[in-house]
Structures are given as structure tokens and as C-alpha cells.
Amino acid sequence: MVGYVLKRILMVLAGYLIAVLVGLVALVAIYAALSSLPNVPSYFELMQFTPVAVLVVPPLGMFVYFLMIVATGMQTLIFALIAEVFSVRSFWLHMLFGGVVAAAGFMLLSPDAPHDPERWADLGTILAAGLVAGFVYWLIAGRDAGFRRPLIERLG
């Protein structure tokens, strides 16, 4: 039983770290896609290159990755514990959790975002990247969520 719980903890940690990385890549892809649309505001044209710098310059990328882990770590821990205790295995709930965690992390880093209409586009983009990260987390750790081992595993 202890071995199974340790395995679940490692899966949650690995799923979280990989999901944050994929979420950052998704954020860059979303900004690049939005900036290529016709009649796009000049803001998105600027954002086309800024997130790419995070991926191209390794020290900057590691700083942003660490910042995202710090900004979303506590919320993710709460949601991961809920998912493990109640054996939540639904991909759409994990995606919802990912979007909520990403939006909450953004609000922690930019508390004036709800009052600034220009930041709403950023919030929506980050929420979409959080949905992608939540799906990746579900693929790695969420499909088998639950501290209790399945009955078939216990019998075998």
C-alpha cells in the first residue's frame, strides 16, 4: 500500500512538472496563432515574439518555468489532493482544474488584471493554456487518480 501511494505521489509530481512545461509551450503557440490572424490588435503582434524568447533563451525560460511553478504550486496541490482522495478521473475536470490554476496563478502575478480590460485577452490566453496543461496532467497522472488501489490490482 505504501509503495502504491509513493507511486501516485511521484506520478502527480511528474504530471505537474510536465504539464507546466507543456502549458508554457501552449501559451507560446496560442499567442503565435493569435498574432497571425487578420486585423489583430498591435498588442498581439508584440506578444508574438515575447513568449518565443522564453523558449529560445534558456535562462529566461528556466526563470519563467520556476515562476510558474511557484505561482501555481499551492493551487495544484489542493486540486491534486482532491483528485487523489476522491479518485477524480475525468479528463474535463482535470482540464477545468488546469484552467482555474493557470488563471489563479496569473491573478497572483498580475493582481490588477480584472480591472484592466487589456489584460483580459492575456487571462483568456493563459486560461486556454491551462486547459491544455490540465489535459496533459490527466494523461500522465489523472487517468489513474486515487490513493486506493483498484480492486483488480489488489486481487492480483
Image (cartoon, helix red, strand yellow):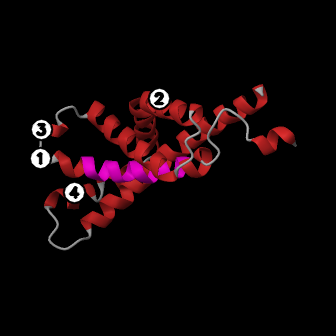
Report the residue at 44% width, 54% height from top: 132
Eyeballing the image, is 91 above or below 33?
A: above
Q: Name the residue tied to disc 4.
A: 46
* Label 4 or label 1, whichever comes before in sequence order: 4
* Label 1 or label 2, whichever comes before in sequence order: 2
* Label 2 or label 4, whichever comes before in sequence order: 4
Report the residue at 40% width, 39% height from top: 64
| Residue 73: quarter of image | top left
Q: Name the residue tied to disc 3.
A: 115
Q: Is residue 141 left or right of residue 7?
A: left
Q: Are marks 3 and 1 in contact (CB under 8 Å)?
A: no
- Residue 75 locus on image (x, y percent): 42, 31
User: SS of the residue at dot 1?
Assistant: loop
Discs 4/1, front: 1
| Residue 70: quarter of image | top left
Asked if residue 75 can be seen in this view, the reply is yes
Extreme-bottom residue of the structure? 38
3D distance between C-alphas at marks 4 and 1: 17 Å
| Residue 45: quarter of image | bottom left
Dot 1 surroundings within 10 Å: few (below 14), some, or many (20 or more)? few
Which span is picked out in magenta?
A: 123-137
Q: Is residue 126 magenta?
A: yes
User: SS of the residue at dot 2?
Assistant: helix
Image quarter hosting the C terminus? top right
User: SS of the residue at dot 4?
Assistant: helix
Q: Name the residue tied to disc 2.
A: 78
Q: Is residue 118 magenta?
A: no
Q: Is residue 146 left or right of residue 71?
A: right
3D distance between C-alphas at marks 2 and 3: 27 Å
